[in-house]
């Protein structure tokens, strides 16, 4: 299997280069040159398969050209060590809970897969993994790569714009994990990381890679839980729609990958906060990056989503196909809080702010359909990770899981930096 750049379909590399380099030299994101369609009998068997069993076949269909079955099984076993329960919230509306991993966020799936695959593929040279985070990516990658030999992780995050709990999860580990608090927004952090990858002087002196969702090894495994959610639906007669809380859009692109592989998903909802460049595009405006704005759903505070070009690539760069399959909605903080409170009062279910945005998008989409459909919204983080917002909105006290409470009691270790690429480069050369 070769992997092509979203900026040039003729530029192709092997799996090792796509994973270890992360970003193509032309700043494009890597995509598999062909997307396998799984056989009909696989979907017939899905309800009887465990999460890992379906993982072996799905990952095998994508990676069997490059990895042995033993390696594929090892990758899946390392990744899928926790469940992703499908919970009915209302009639025909389900929450896919993706927060049962080590850092209680959906990014645990991709981070664990990525760290294991990198350790399989890398040479004996030391790797420096650069990560920009708006919240959960930092904690998932830090914990996924913590203690991995030959890998040093450098995490850039915007000062004051991630929750205290998220911050503690990636600033307290030490060891091979470094954290840099940047005076700026997430897009500034992401820009600095991309500049580093494209700096020939820096790359001649060290081996750099990414564990953001721009890396194909972080992105692809996220397709697994879409198959799993479908397999656990009690009834499958109606059209199925997934609503995805979206920031950098890797999660949504992974769902579309699953659909391209044959999973019968009729529609996707791209649900965002007021950082709405993709919903605006889906409503007919030109795609145009904008400065990100701070919200209570901070993991989605992204004004220039990298994976937008993966969305297009999955539809052969046919905008009309993309807009037919994916519908965009956006919501304010007040609307998000109102949804959290309404669902808690009416059903007893507690949503975090990101899940609440996805719930709102799902309900608005379903309400506009002429026929009933089944809806799944993604709950991407444990409510405890946004404890202040959830407790204030719902007037309740949340008990933090023990593993989250343990992070809160540790000491933060960070380096502070201005939004200045040359300062960042000097830092990298000094470590």
Image: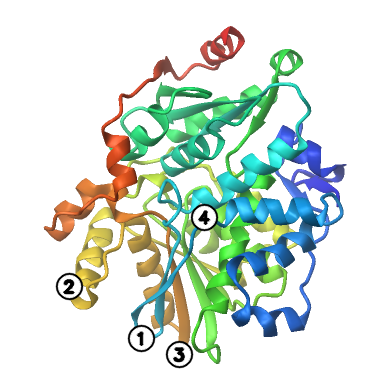
Q: Earlier in the sequence, mark 4 or mark 3?
A: 4
In percent of width and height, residue 49 lies at 63, 76
The local secondary structure at tag 4 comes to helix
Q: Residue at x 30, y 24 (%)?
A: 411
Task: State whether residue 204 appears in this view.
Answer: yes
Q: Residues within 10 Å of mark 1 (few under 14, many from 20)?
A: few
The local secondary structure at tag 3 comes to loop
Q: Residues within 10 Å of mark 4 (few under 14, many from 20)?
A: many
**Which disc number belongs to residue 345?**
2
- Looking at the image, residue 107 sits to the left or right of residue 206; the answer is left
Q: Earlier in the sequence, mark 2 or mark 3?
A: 2
In front: label 4 or label 1: 1
The residue pinned by badge 3 equals: 372
Dots 2 and 3: beta carbons under 8 Å? no
The residue pinned by badge 4 equals: 278
- In the rendered image, the vertical position of residue 199 relative to residue 372, given as above or below: above
The residue pinned by badge 1 equals: 91
In front: label 2 or label 3: 2
């Amino acid at each position: 299997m070769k992997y092509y750049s979203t900026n040039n379909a003729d530029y192709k590399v092997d799996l090792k280069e796509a994973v270890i380099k992360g970003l193509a030299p032309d700043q494009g994101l890597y995509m598999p040159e062909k997307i396998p369609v799984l056989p009909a009998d696989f979907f017939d068997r899905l309800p009887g398969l465990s999460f890992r069993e379906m993982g072996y076949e799905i990952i095998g269909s994508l990676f069997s050209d490059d990895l042995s079955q033993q390696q594929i099984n090892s990758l899946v076993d390392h990744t899928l060590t926790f469940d992703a329960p499908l919970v009915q919230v209302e009639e025909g509306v389900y929450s896919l809970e993706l927060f049962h991993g080590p850092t209680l966020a959906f990014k645990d799936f991709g981070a664990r897969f990525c760290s294991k695959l990198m350790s399989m593929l890398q040479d004996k040279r030391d790797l420096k993994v650069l990560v920009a985070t708006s919240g959960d990516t930092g904690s998932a990658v830090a914990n996924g790569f913590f203690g991995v030999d030959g890998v040093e992780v450098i995490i850039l995050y915007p000062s004051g714009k991630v929750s205290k709990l998220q911050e503690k999860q990636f600033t307290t580990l030490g060891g091979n994990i470094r954290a840099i608090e940047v005076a700026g927004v997430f897009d500034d952090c992401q820009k600095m990381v991309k500049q580093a990858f494209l700096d020939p002087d820096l790359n001649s002196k060290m081996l750099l890679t990414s564990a953001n969702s721009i890396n194909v090894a972080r992105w692809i495994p996220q397709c697994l839980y879409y198959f799993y959610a479908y397999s656990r639906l009690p009834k499958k007669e109606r059209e199925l729609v997934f609503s995805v809380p979206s920031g950098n859009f890797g999660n949504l692109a992974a769902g579309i990958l699953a659909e391209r592989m044959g999973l019968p998903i009729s529609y996707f909802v791209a649900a965002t906060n007021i950082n709405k460049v993709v919903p605006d595009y889906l409503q007919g405006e030109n795609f145009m990056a904008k400065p990100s704005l701070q919200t209570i759903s901070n993991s989605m505070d992204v004004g220039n989503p990298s994976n937008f070009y993966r969305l297009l690539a999955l539809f052969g760069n046919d905008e009309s196909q993309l807009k037919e399959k994916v519908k965009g909605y956006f919501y304010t903080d007040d609307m998000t809080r109102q949804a959290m409170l309404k669902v808690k009062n009416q059903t007893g279910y507690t949503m975090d702010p990101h899940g609440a945005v996805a719930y709102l998008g799902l309900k608005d989409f379903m309400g506009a359909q002429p026929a009933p459909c089944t809806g799944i919204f993604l709950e991407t983080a444990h409510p405890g990770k946004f404890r202040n917002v959830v407790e204030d909105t719902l007037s309740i006290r949340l008990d933090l899981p023990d593993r989250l409470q343990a992070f809160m009691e540790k000491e933060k270790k960070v380096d502070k930096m201005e939004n200045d690429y040359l300062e960042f480069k000097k830092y990298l050369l000094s470590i």
